[in-house]
Image (cartoon, rainbow, N blue to C red):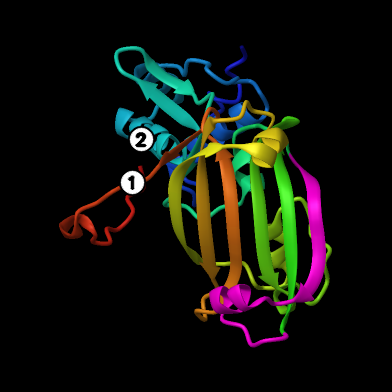
Amino acid sequence: MSHDTIFRALVTDADEPLYKQLQGNLREAVQSQALKPESLLPTERELSEKLEVSRVTVRKAVEGLVQEGLLTRKQGSGTYVASRIEKNFSKLSSFSEDMKARGRTPSSEWLLREKGSVTPDEALSLGLSPGTAVFRFHRIRMSDGEPMALEYSTIPASALNHSGKISSSLYATLDTYGNRPVRALQRLRAVPFEGEIAVLLGVPAGSPGLFIERRAYLRTGQTVEVTQSYYRGDAYDFVAELKTGADDVSQPESRL
């Protein structure tokens, strides 16, 4: 395993903080497969000495990637590249972005891609008037060719300029029209996968999974996405950072 990318020199007088530069090096090493899933990361001391930065800088860089789910800590063993996909609920990102950040290749198998009039339930969820046009996108989401999740999305047609063409990432396409969501509400529950869902995801009937309902909003408050997803329980871990109200205070970012 080559550590050239990890130990690439950091620029002390750059606009980007040192810990952010180190995060970029580590992320690139994962994406390029220089660090493969379950690979052990060099120790905090080794990174600090070879990069000539403080251990506080290294710790901050690594902690950020642990929170993202790119790295994982094992008590008494060290820090590793995550093998399971860790989805951080504190960050609103697309499936494609999550996979690419982990050095994986995202793809989709289309089940349905259609334009139609909003149904009563969709109108209620999206805050749309009867007869408004929407797009419905149903997909199997793949990582390195392996089924990982099912997504059933409904999007106002106006958010996509009434064009049903989307790239591999729905959020990237919404972004091109200035309609990428900035916040979302999600509800999840554990479910067993049965019938067609189990078949589409390639898992035995009764396999554990997570059902997630997401409603995403523009900065204006307008609902721009309603998605129901089924994520494989054997491939995903969901993480969230929790804080007390007393800690929810903005602090100036130090240049470590």
Looking at the image, residue 216 sits to the left or right of residue 158; the answer is left
Image quarter of the N terminus: top right
Position of residue 7 in the picture relative to residue 255 (left or right): right
Who's the residue at 59% across and 73% down the image? Answer: 121
Q: Position of residue 210 (x, y in %)?
A: 50, 42
In the image, what residue occupies the spot 78% across and 77% down?
161
Residue that protrudes farthest toward the front in the picture: 195
Mark 1 highlights which residue? Answer: 241
Marks 1/2: CA–CA distance: 20 Å
> Could you say whether the residue bearing mark 2 is in a helix, strand or loop?
helix
Residue 155 seen in render: yes
Query: Which residues fall within the magenta stretch?
Result: 107-131
Tag 2 or tag 1, which sits nearer the N-term?
2
**Label 1 crowd bin: few (<14), some (14–19), many (20+), radius 10 Å:** few
- 74 is within the stretch colored magenta: no
Picture quarter containing residue 118?
bottom right
Numbered disc 1: secondary structure: loop
Q: Which mark is residue 30?
A: none
Instruction: Judge whether residue 48 can be spotted in this image.
Output: no
Q: Position of residue 112 (x, y in %)?
A: 80, 56
- Estimate the x, y position of residue 89 in percent, counting from the top left: 44, 49
Q: Position of residue 190 (x, y in %)?
A: 45, 41
- Mark nearer the viewer, 1 or 2: 1
Q: Residue furthest left?
A: 246
Crowd band around label 2 with a 10 angstrom C-alpha radius: few (<14), some (14–19), many (20+): many
Q: Residue at x 42, y 27 (%)?
A: 72
Q: Residue at left 67%, top 87%?
A: 130
What number is the disc on residue 57? Answer: 2
